[in-house]
Amino acid sequence: MITAMVFHLSHFQAMTLFALLISIAFGFLSRRRTSERVKYIIWSLFLFLLIGVGIGWAMYPFSR
Amino acid sequence: MPDETTTDAAVVATTPQHSAATPAHPQRSEALAFAIGVAGWLVPGLGHALQKMWGRALGCFLTVGALVFLGVGMRGNLFSSEGGDAFGMLGYVADLGTGSFYFAARALETKGSDVAHAEGDYGTRFLAAAGVLNLLAALHAYEAARGRKA
């Protein structure tokens, strides 16, 4: 019997987790050397978060 | 995580991708590359593992697995073939991109989806992203097997 598991994540937590996992996958697929991968993952994660928060701020005036 | 520069170089020398360049057995190597791509789709990371790209194999397996696990845990919607409209079919294709993980997700999501809340909606995106990411990884494995730069 598989017990049901439910995660309760905030918007920011979900976005951060999503950005982290996608960045890791892209880093591993597109770079070979470990140092290049780490740099790529950090840079990609930073841009994901920056653009995500930026779009959130841009949409704020239209949210109500 | 190990540096894959040497590993990939060794694979380049041993896998039939170079025979694709030579006219000896181009159809056979193309079929093998296709089989590697399909293997990568069925089990995330397997296409790279078969080519001894261990880092990429592990990276694909863990990231796709984590996205599916989180998507199911957030009660995202897993589309089925009886979706009806075009968006439902698109969602089904994206979800099916995770290969065998699609069926694992179906087994894990015992409570069903709940897209009435933001979490469930996020979960749906996680599941679709996992599928599309795995399709990208499988395509990458296929291209690597064909001898393209990877």
Image (cartoon, grey):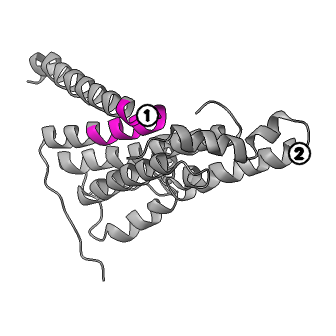
Left or right of A46? Residue A25 is right
Residue A27 image position (x, y, % from top left): 39, 34
Residue B84 image position (x, y, % from top left): 50, 50
Rendered residue at 45%/51% (across/down): B95
The crowding category of the residue bearing disc 2, from other C-alpha atoms within 10 Å (few below 14, some 14 to 19, many at least 20), is: few
In this rendering, does residue B116 appear at all? no
Rendered residue at 13%/54% (across/down): A8
Q: Nearer the viewer, residue B57 or B82?
A: B57
Q: Amino acid at mark 2?
A: His
Q: In the rendered image, which residue does mark 2 sit on?
A: B25
The crowding category of the residue bearing disc 1, from other C-alpha atoms within 10 Å (few below 14, some 14 to 19, many at least 20), is: some
Look at the image and give the residue range highlighted in magenta: A20-35
Quote the CA–CA distance across marks 2 and 1.
32 Å
Taking the view exactly as shown, the residue that stands out farthest to the right is B24
Residue B2 image position (x, y, % from top left): 42, 46
Left or right of B35? Residue B58 is left
Rendered residue at 32%/66% (across/down): B109
Q: In the rendered image, which residue does mark 1 sit on?
A: A33
Report the number of discs. Answer: 2
As for residue A23 lying within the magenta part, the answer is yes
